[in-house]
Image (cartoon, helix red, strand yellow):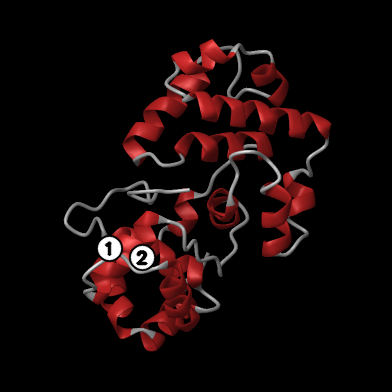
Amino acid sequence: MDYAIAIATLKQADPLLGKVIEQVGACQLNQTQHTGDLFSSLSRSIIYQQLSTKAANAIHGRFLQLYPNQPVPTAMDVLKTPDEVLRSAGISRSKALYLKDLAQKIVDGLPTLAELEKLDDESIIQTLIQVKGIGRWSAQMLLMFRFHRWDVLPVDDLGIRAGIRKVYGLAELPSKKAVEQLGHQWKPYCSIASWYLWRSLDLDNLKKDGEPAVISQ
């Protein structure tokens, strides 16, 4: 993907964010796109909620290891897995329930990725938040990292708010409303701005994976 126009627009609209862009360098949002079907993507989001990337990577890896005979489990696989087995991978009781609810809704006919991709951002969000444990944040991660939507601003994300506090020299974390107001100047490239805010937290020790350093439902 060519982010040149988006980067130029953001630099002109927001000089403070522009400094971060200069420090971080080329946008690598397209290098961190999620793969797999809808169940794979959403189950990953559920597991990653409210965890650091390092901890979530470890638990997600153990989850996949529960199904050694295939690359990723299917919804039916998870429905057949006892809760205590999911718990043994480090998945909390509530997340085990969320995974089962997701699996059941997939079996019952939740729209596929191909069907969802035809919808606008808000329609996708409203469809997905019917699943227990899938809030706006999880749906927005899918929009950004799977559907490549460029104008997503996850105001619930702790990393975004911490990045804003750092970049703009705020005394405390901004409110969700303040994030929304600030985000008006980034349109229609809020996803790219969000990526740079995440990266601003890692400027002293940039990671290669491009994932949020801190994530929150």
Q: How many marks?
A: 2
Residue type at the position of mark 2:
Tyr
| Above/below status of 98 relative to 144 | above
What residue sits 55% from the left and 77% below the top? 188
Among the 4 quarters of the image, the one containing residue 103: top right
| Cα distance between the residues tagged 1 and 2 | 6 Å
Secondary structure state at the residue bearing disc 1: helix
The answer to which quarter of the image holds residue 179 is bottom left
Please tell me whether residue 210 is drawn above or below residue 152 in the rendered image.
above
Which residue is nearer to you in this view: 102 or 41?
102
Which residue appears farthest toward the left when viewing the image?
A: 204
Q: Circle 1 sits on which residue? A: 200
Please tell me the numbered disc located at residue 16: none
Could you tell me residue 184's position as x and y percent? 49, 81
Q: Secondary structure at mark 2?
A: helix
Residue visible at 25% across and 66% down in the picture = 172
Question: In the picture provided, is 87 more to the left or to the right than 104?
Answer: left
Q: Is residue 46 visible?
A: yes
- Residue 159, horizontal then vertical, whole percent: 35, 56
**Type of amino acid under label 1:** Ser
Residue 206 percent across, percent down from the top left: 24, 53
Q: Residue at position x 21%, y 59% from top?
A: 203
Relative vertical location of residue 147 with respect to residue 104 in this rendering, above or below: below
> Which residue is drawn at the image coordinates 44% and 20% (left, top)?
62
Task: Report the residue marked by disc 2.
Answer: 196
Is 131 situated left or right of 26 in this image? right
